[in-house]
């Protein structure tokens, strides 16, 4: 998710090297394009993504969330399996509300691209 909208979108607190940002974005975009079922906003500072499950999907989501949390510590991720789906929760503090909104737009667009 790092670098979603170009260099001016990325907050200064993101520590992922600039050269790696497009690769990370491509990983997230591919996951959302392949697996996204639903996006909801249960709270103003939280997204809930429901992804189609399958072999290795939960592990893939967990691994991406761990790496993203390592460079963008303002994201709080939780991952759970739920009746054949993988639910990814993403929360931010109030200072990063605009980033969550940008993420929601990107996720929705990637999911429509399938």
Image (spheres, grey):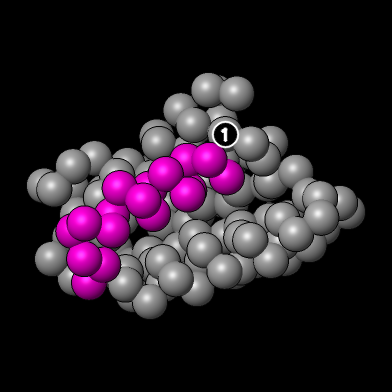
With respect to residue 57, does 112 lie above or below?
above
Dividing the image into 4 quarters, which one contains the C terminus? top right
Q: Which residue is located at x 88 percent, y 54 percent? A: 83
Residue interval drawn in magenta: 14-31
46 displayed left or right of 86: left
Q: Nearer the viewer, residue 113 or 55?
A: 55
Outermost top residue: 113
Query: Does the stretch in magenta take in 20?
Result: yes
Q: Which residue is located at x 18 percent, y 58 percent? A: 18
Task: Name the spot of residue 30 as percent of width and height, x first.
Answer: 53, 40
58 displayed left or right of 84: left
**In the rendered image, which quarter is residue 6 located in?**
top left
Q: Which residue is mark 1?
A: 33
49 displayed left or right of 6: right
Q: Say which element carries label 1.
A: helix
With respect to residue 39, does 14 lie above or below?
below
Task: Name the spot of residue 36 as percent of width and height, x first.
Answer: 64, 38
Task: Name the spot of residue 19 as percent of width and height, x first.
Answer: 21, 57
Q: Nearer the viewer, residue 2 or 96?
A: 2
Query: Does the stretch in magenta take in 6?
Result: no
Task: Name the spot of residue 90 as percent of width and height, x first.
Answer: 50, 60
Q: Nearer the viewer, residue 82 or 95?
A: 82
**In the rendered image, which quarter is residue 17 located in?**
bottom left
């Amino acid at each position: 998710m790092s670098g979603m909208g170009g260099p001016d979108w990325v907050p200064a607190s993101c520590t992922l090297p600039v050269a790696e940002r497009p690769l990370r974005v491509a990983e997230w975009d591919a996951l959302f394009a392949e697996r996204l079922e639903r996006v909801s906003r249960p709270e103003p500072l939280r997204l809930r993504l429901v992804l189609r499950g399958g072999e290795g999907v939960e592990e893939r989501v967990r691994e991406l969330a761990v790496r993203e949390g390592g460079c963008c510590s303002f994201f709080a991720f939780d991952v759970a399996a739920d009746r054949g789906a993988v639910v990814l929760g993403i929360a931010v503090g109030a200072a990063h509300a605009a980033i969550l909104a940008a993420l929601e737009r990107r996720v929705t667009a990637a999911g429509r691209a399938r």
